[in-house]
């Protein structure tokens, strides 16, 4: 295990660019360790070292070691490797991914990369795990709360789980953290592309309680007339 992970980290370090490293920091409020590598190169390195002959459980250990490194690019490879095994997922794998979020995720990019694809795939395969997302939505960890919403982005794009989307939005409705507000606003925005009238009704019902950030995200893809209606009745958010 150590050899594979060390080879990946060495390759990332070798291709790191100081200018890219410095410029990438502007996307984060928190200082995030990065090597400074473009996403295409990260993907290429991940494919080069993917441990095809290993079992799923061994690959989970490789992924965990990459998460433990703390480097942004290493977490992306961990996300890609875990998603590559989606056909082998069992319901219990949700607990593995939940633990990674709780222990290792410390920025929106790692959170969204893991949750949009890996966690979202588990949810589509095992919808009963949505109950766990609702528990995540009550966590004291901001990344767990964001994960509760962004794990439903891909299913929402397909028109799935609308009632659960509303339930999670209700749990996060008054969250004071803007990173969480953006997460559930994004979830509602994506859901609106298949369920525009339902999302619009939800926004109109809750707009006086929704933080400005969440509301603006939620209505972003709606027609101008609906945006104006959503904004007009709450002068405090203009």
Image (cartoon, rainbow, N blue to C red):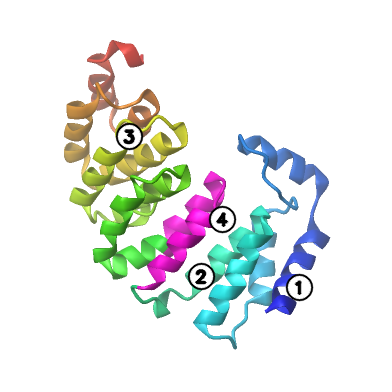
**Location of mark 3 (residue):** 218
Q: Earlier in the sequence, mark 3 or mark 4?
A: 4
**Location of mark 4 (residue):** 104
Contact flag, marks 3 and 4 (Cβ < 8 Å): no
Q: Is residue 156 above or below residue 2?
A: above
**Location of mark 1 (residue):** 7
In the image, residue 112 lies in the stretch drawn in magenta: yes
Q: CA distance from mark 3 to mark 4?
A: 28 Å
**Location of mark 2 (residue):** 82
Q: CA distance from mark 1 to mark 2?
A: 18 Å
Per the rendered image, the range of residues in magenta is 92-118
Q: Quadrant of residue 219?
A: top left
Q: Earlier in the sequence, mark 2 or mark 4?
A: 2
Image point 64% across, 65% down: which residue?
66
* Secondary element at tag 1: helix
Q: Is residue 16 above or below residue 29?
A: below
* Secondary element at tag 2: helix
Q: Is residue 227 above or below residue 173?
A: above
Q: Earlier in the sequence, mark 1 or mark 2?
A: 1
Judge from the rendering whether residue 119 lies leftward or rightward of residue 10; answer left or right: left
Dominant secondary structure of the residues highlighted in magenta in the image = helix
Which labelled disc corresponds to residue 168?
Answer: none
Image point 68% across, 76% down: which residue?
49
Image point 17% across, 28% down: which residue?
205
Q: Earlier in the sequence, mark 3 or mark 2?
A: 2
């Amino acid at each position: 295990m150590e050899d594979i992970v060390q080879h990946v980290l060495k390759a990332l370090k070798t291709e790191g660019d100081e200018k890219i490293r410095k410029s990438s920091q502007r996307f984060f409020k928190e200082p995030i360790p990065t090597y400074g590598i473009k996403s295409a190169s990260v993907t290429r390195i991940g494919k080069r070292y993917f441990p095809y002959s290993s079992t799923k459980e061994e690959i989970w250990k490789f992924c965990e070691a990459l998460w433990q490194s703390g480097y942004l690019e290493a977490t992306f490879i961990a996300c890609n490797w875990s998603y590559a095994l989606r056909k082998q997922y069992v319901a219990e794998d949700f607990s593995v991914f939940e633990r990674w979020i709780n222990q290792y995720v410390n920025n929106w990019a790692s959170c969204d990369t893991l949750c949009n694809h890996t966690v979202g795939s588990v949810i589509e395969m095992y919808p009963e795990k949505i109950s766990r997302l609702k528990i995540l939505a009550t966590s004291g960890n901001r990344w767990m709360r964001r994960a509760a919403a962004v794990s439903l982005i891909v299913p929402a794009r397909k028109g799935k789980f609308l009632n659960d989307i509303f339930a999670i939005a209700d749990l996060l409705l008054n969250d004071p953290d803007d990173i969480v507000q953006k997460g559930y606003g994004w979830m509602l925005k994506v859901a609106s592309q298949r369920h525009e009238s339902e999302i619009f009704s939800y926004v109109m019902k809750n707009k006086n309680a929704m933080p400005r950030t969440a509301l603006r995200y939620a209505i972003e893809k709606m027609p101008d007339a609906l945006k104006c209606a959503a904004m007009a009745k709450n002068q405090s958010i203009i």
